[in-house]
Image (tube, rainbow, N blue to C red):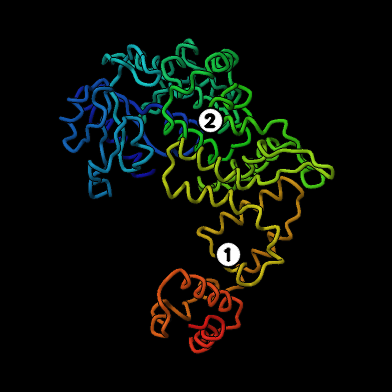
């Protein structure tokens, strides 16, 4: 049993010892019943936030207005975390901080004027009332971890057994309350390979155009989970089928029906090709690689043309780079993530030339940051199209056979050396140093003396 699970059970024991009801709730119950190890544990109780904080003095108050507080592991178990390390927003913490248990008071929610958060909450003593305000039946189960008795007010176990994603109560009302639930329905259906119940699916179709009320950050996080949880292909098919895709990522929806030259892409149009890449993503998968795969051909729809010889996408990489950056900035990715995702889009076509590259050009290519992601994107790109992995194996073998110090050698000559040799600092320095490095990477310069002679001969003072 994991330390965090033991901690959650001890919280429940303590709450019950002080006269309160307390159960495991939400996704951890679902995962336990499916035989999976939960990523985090949540507790629901009739104790108010004030009472929880009195019982557990080290509790962090992060969403008391919604009845939510965090109880960290004792410091002896690695649970001491600074309160200022916890970002705002009651639903964010347990998944980001594995050493805390979220404890929420039974409640009912009143009004959702922003389509995301309740305007008002009313604390309750009735666990059934708390369950009825939750999203899906498979997430509405409560578990007594001591007796292992399940409280099921919504037929959640039946839907688990039959593989059904069903909204609790009126699905349209559930989605009106919180528009993010539409994306969560798609993600759960994809992740568990479940079917979406007809009324739930129909409600998403009717309300898909309202998904824009969700913050871009929350939308990004939900889409990222779809991409990296191992069922991205199915997730994006469901996004398309429900009408959510043109609302959240119209640039991906625009790929549908955009034909490709069959000699290079026998699999079909750009959308089909992209979904095949998603199907081949490794698991686990870095989020930057996942988004790079999704966006690598985003520039093809606006550059599509039928030339006399074949279909062409002139400049699709350059256009795609600009589009990918705009999409990532719109979704509030970090600058580091944007840089890597855009680099993946910018460089994905360069593998076609690796066997013809000069040694210096190839080594510079191989030393791109996180190059393994570039290599993996090329592999799944080939697998999703013509299937020719010649360039992939050539590059992988070259990378494995070349010592790091040969790919990124210590410079033979520096700016200080040029100044000492009588050169005046300026734009010319970059040209000189780059030329020296080219020759060093090619193996024709191996010492500082040789490099200085090369400079004097080719770039006289």
Q: Position of residue 33 (x, y in %)?
A: 48, 30
Classify 37 as above or below 157. below
The residue positioned 51% from the left and 75% from the top of the image is 432
- Label 1 SS: helix
Classify 103 as above or below 274. above
Classify 37 as above or below 365. above
Residue sitting nearer the eye, 372 or 154? 372
Q: Residue beneath label 2, please?
A: 187
Query: How far is the residue under mark 1 from the one under mark 2?
Result: 35 Å
Instruction: State which tag comes first along the sequence, 1 or 2.
Output: 2
Relative side of 43 to 311, left or right? left
Mark carried by residue 225: none
Relative side of 337 to 274, left or right? left
Can you say which quadrant of the picture contains the N terminus?
top left
Q: Dot 1: few (<14), some (14–19), or many (≥20) neighbours within 10 Å?
A: many
The residue positioned 42% from the left and 39% from the top of the image is 39
Q: Position of residue 270 (x, y in %)?
A: 70, 38
Q: Position of residue 23 (x, y in %)?
A: 33, 26
Relative side of 442 to 107, left or right? right
Relative side of 288 to 106, left or right? right
Q: Position of residue 104 (x, y in %)?
A: 29, 26
Residue sitting nearer the eye, 135 or 142? 135
Q: Dot 2: few (<14), some (14–19), or many (≥20) neighbours within 10 Å?
A: many
Q: Residue beneath label 1, please?
A: 366
Classify 120 as above or below 86. above
Rendering quarter of residue 117: top left
The residue positioned 21% from the left and 35% from the top of the image is 59
Find out whether the residues at labels 1 and 2 contact each other: C-beta distance under 8 Å.
no
Task: Give the label, 1 or 2, closer to the camera.
Answer: 1
Residue sitting nearer the eye, 411 or 234? 411
């Amino acid at each position: 049993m994991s330390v965090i699970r033991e901690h959650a059970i001890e919280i429940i024991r303590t709450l019950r010892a002080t006269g309160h009801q307390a159960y495991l709730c939400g996704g951890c119950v679902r995962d336990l019943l499916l035989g999976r190890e939960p990523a985090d544990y949540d507790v629901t109780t009739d104790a108010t936030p004030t009472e929880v904080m009195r019982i557990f003095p080290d509790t962090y108050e992060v969403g008391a207005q919604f009845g939510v507080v965090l109880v960290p592991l004792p410091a002896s178990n690695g649970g001491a975390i600074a309160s200022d390390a916890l970002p705002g927003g009651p639903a964010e913490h347990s998944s980001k901080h594995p050493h805390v248990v979220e404890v929420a008071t039974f409640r009912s929610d009143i009004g959702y004027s922003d389509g995301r958060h309740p305007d008002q909450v009313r604390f309750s003593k009735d666990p059934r009332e708390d369950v009825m305000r939750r999203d899906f039946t498979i997430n509405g189960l409560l578990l007594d971890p001591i007796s292992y008795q399940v409280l099921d007010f919504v037929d959640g176990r039946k839907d688990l057994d039959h593989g059904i994603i069903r909204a609790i109560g009126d699905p349209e009302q559930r989605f009106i309350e919180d528009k993010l639930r539409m994306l969560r329905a798609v993600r759960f259906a994809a992740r568990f390979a479940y079917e979406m119940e007809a009324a739930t699916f129909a409600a998403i179709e009717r309300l898909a155009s309202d998904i824009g009320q969700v913050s871009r950050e929350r939308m990004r996080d939900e889409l990222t989970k779809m991409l990296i949880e191992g069922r991205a292909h199915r997730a994006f098919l469901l996004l398309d089928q429900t009408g959510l895709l043109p609302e959240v990522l119209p640039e991906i929806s625009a790929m549908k029906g955009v034909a490709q030259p069959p000699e290079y892409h026998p699999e079909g149009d750009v959308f089909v090709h992209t979904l095949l890449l998603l199907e081949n993503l490794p698991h686990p998968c870095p989020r930057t690689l996942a988004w790079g795969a999704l966006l690598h051909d985003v520039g093809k729809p606006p550059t599509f043309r039928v030339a006399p010889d074949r279909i062409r996408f002139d400049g699709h990489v350059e256009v795609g780079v600009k589009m990918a950056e705009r999409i990532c900035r719109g979704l509030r990715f970090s600058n580091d993530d944007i840089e890597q995702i855009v680099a993946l889009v910018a460089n994905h076509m360069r593998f076609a030339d690796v066997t013809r590259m000069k040694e210096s050009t190839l080594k510079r290519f191989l030393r791109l940051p996180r190059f393994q992601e570039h290599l993996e994107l090329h592999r799944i790109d080939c697998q999703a199209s013509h299937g020719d992995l010649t360039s992939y194996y050539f590059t992988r073998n070259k990378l494995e056979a070349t010592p790091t110090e040969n790919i990124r050698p210590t410079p033979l000559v520096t700016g200080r050396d040029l100044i000492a040799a009588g050169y005046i600092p300026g734009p010319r320095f970059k040209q000189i140093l780059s030329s020296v490095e080219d020759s060093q990477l090619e193996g024709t310069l191996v010492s500082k003396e040789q490099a200085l002679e090369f400079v004097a001969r080719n770039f006289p003072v």
